Image (cartoon, helix red, strand yellow):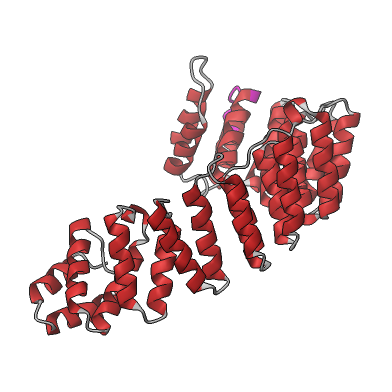
């Protein structure tokens, strides 16, 4: 009855459901857990000889879309002719998109071909869903063929179609093909001009394939076209340079782009993290301290990873001193809460009890919970040191 009411209300002239409403209806009616409800309602309409229209099927299919139940959506589509109705392209698009998201591109392709047999024509939404689906499935050749077919049908690809195909080429194709397609976007211009996300996808593809120096040339090309890099673009290049051992190039890149839409803090934080990942902890620590001295704010990942690695090397007191410096600079808000537990257990184990007590009280003030695996060790150490009250308070906020 709840489902029937929702469908009935959706047919009223003054009602237009949002995606949020469909989502909440799916949750309340448990459509994903009980998808048979959809077909039961349609069967009930048939038995009761209710007046059914195409809009009613669209409401039902939008519920399927929100619940991501592709097979049931297909069964709903097959029920439409039983009520002497003809599905339109909007109905087909919902079902095609569901199968694309499911990764069943054979069924999606079958449905697209079926459209032409009932005098319907795919629209831009159909082509976009299919091209994206083929790209996600690694069927790049099919995606490119469909892209060409779309043009032959008189459709002008928009930036979304270009971007999704370029992303697919970057993921599954060659870097040469990606550059050719990027050049085509630049030549086409207008609304199809590549943006920062487009360029960053290509740069990421080159870096992942170990061609970071070539990726740097794409950055130059990007800036020539008047497109400024963002934080993700720069971090991608820094990570690529460090992974390939070109750390000096990473420093040069930061000198070039820092302060031009990307902060010094973001740039150097990315470099600190990358240096740690390639086991150059000493260099990372020197850079981190230079950042602090110059007033460049390290991000939470850099702070957390730096303290974690120092503790892992057995230098727990140094880790605490670094924590204390960061706290004085008020950069602690984004530090991983687990770092407090790692630091506290290390201080207790190495009998730095004054520092341990100071950190524990700071955790209490900030309401930071102890990580469960460390609770017993920390509480035992604090009790043995004579600070039983502090141990009791910490145990109360343990996870």
Residue 113 seen anywhere in this rendered image of the structure:
no
Vertical relation: 5 (above or below) 296: above
Q: Residue at x 75, y 61 (%)?
A: 209
Magenta-colored stretch includes residue 50: yes
The part of the image, by quadrant, that contains residue 321 is bottom left
Q: Residue at x 17, y 72 (%)?
A: 357
Front-most of 392 and 79? 392
Q: Is residue 231 left or right of residue 178?
A: left
The part of the image, by quadrant, that contains residue 128 is top right
Q: Residue at x 80, y 35 (%)?
A: 185
Magenta range: 47-54
Could you tell me what secondary structure mostly forms the magenta stretch? Answer: loop
The part of the image, by quadrant, that contains residue 143 is top right
Q: Residue at x 22, y 57 (%)?
A: 366
Q: Position of residue 200 (x, y in %)?
A: 67, 46
Q: Position of residue 163 (x, y in %)?
A: 73, 40
Quadrant containing the N terminus is top left
Q: Position of residue 205 (x, y in %)?
A: 72, 54
Magenta-colored stretch includes residue 254: no
Q: Position of residue 238 (x, y in %)?
A: 61, 57
Front-most of 12 and 161? 161
Q: Is residue 15 left or right of residue 303?
A: right
């Amino acid at each position: 009855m709840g489902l029937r009411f929702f469908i009935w209300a959706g047919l009223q002239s003054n009602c237009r459901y949002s995606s949020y409403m469909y989502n909440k209806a799916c949750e309340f009616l448990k459509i994903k857990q009980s998808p048979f409800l959809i077909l039961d309602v349609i069967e009930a309409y048939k038995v009761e000889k209710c007046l059914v229209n195409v809009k009613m099927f669209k409401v039902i299919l939008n519920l399927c879309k929100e619940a991501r139940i592709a097979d049931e959506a297909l069964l709903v589509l097959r029920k439409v002719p039983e009520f002497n109705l003809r599905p339109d392209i909007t109905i087909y698009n919902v079902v095609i998109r569901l199968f694309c998201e499911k990764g069943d591109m054979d069924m999606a392709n079958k449905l697209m071909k079926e459209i032409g047999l009932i005098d319907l024509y795919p629209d831009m939404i159909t082509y976009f869903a299919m091209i994206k689906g083929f790209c996600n499935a690694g069927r790049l050749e099919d995606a490119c063929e469909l892209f060409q077919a779309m043009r032959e049908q008189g459709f002008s690809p928009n930036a979304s179609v270009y971007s999704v195909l370029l992303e697919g080429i970057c993921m599954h194709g060659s870097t040469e093909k990606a550059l050719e397609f990027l050049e085509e976007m630049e030549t086409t211009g207008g609304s199809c001009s590549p943006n920062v996300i487009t360029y960053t996808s290509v740069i990421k593809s080159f870096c992942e394939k170990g061609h970071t120096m070539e990726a740097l040339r794409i950055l130059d090309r990007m800036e020539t076209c008047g497109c400024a890099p963002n934080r993700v673009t720069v971090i991608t290049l820094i990570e690529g340079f460090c992974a390939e051992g070109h750390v000096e190039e990473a420093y040069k890149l930061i000198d070039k782009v820092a302060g031009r839409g990307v902060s010094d803090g973001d740039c150097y934080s990315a470099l600190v993290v990358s240096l740690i990942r390639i086991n150059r902890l000493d260099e990372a620590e020197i850079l981190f301290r230079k950042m602090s001295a110059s007033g460049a704010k390290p991000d939470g990942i850099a702070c957390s990873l730096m303290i974690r690695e120092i503790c892992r090397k057995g230098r727990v007191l140094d880790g605490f001193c670094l924590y204390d410096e960061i706290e004085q600079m008020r950069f602690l808000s984004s530090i991983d809460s687990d770092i407090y537990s790692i630091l506290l257990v290390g201080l207790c184990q190495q009998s730095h009890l004054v520092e341990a007590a100071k950190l524990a009280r700071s955790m209490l003030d900030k309401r930071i919970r102890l990580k469960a695996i460390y609770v017993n060790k920390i509480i035992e150490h604090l009790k043995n040191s004579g600070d039983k009250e502090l141990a009791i308070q910490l145990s109360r906020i343990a996870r």
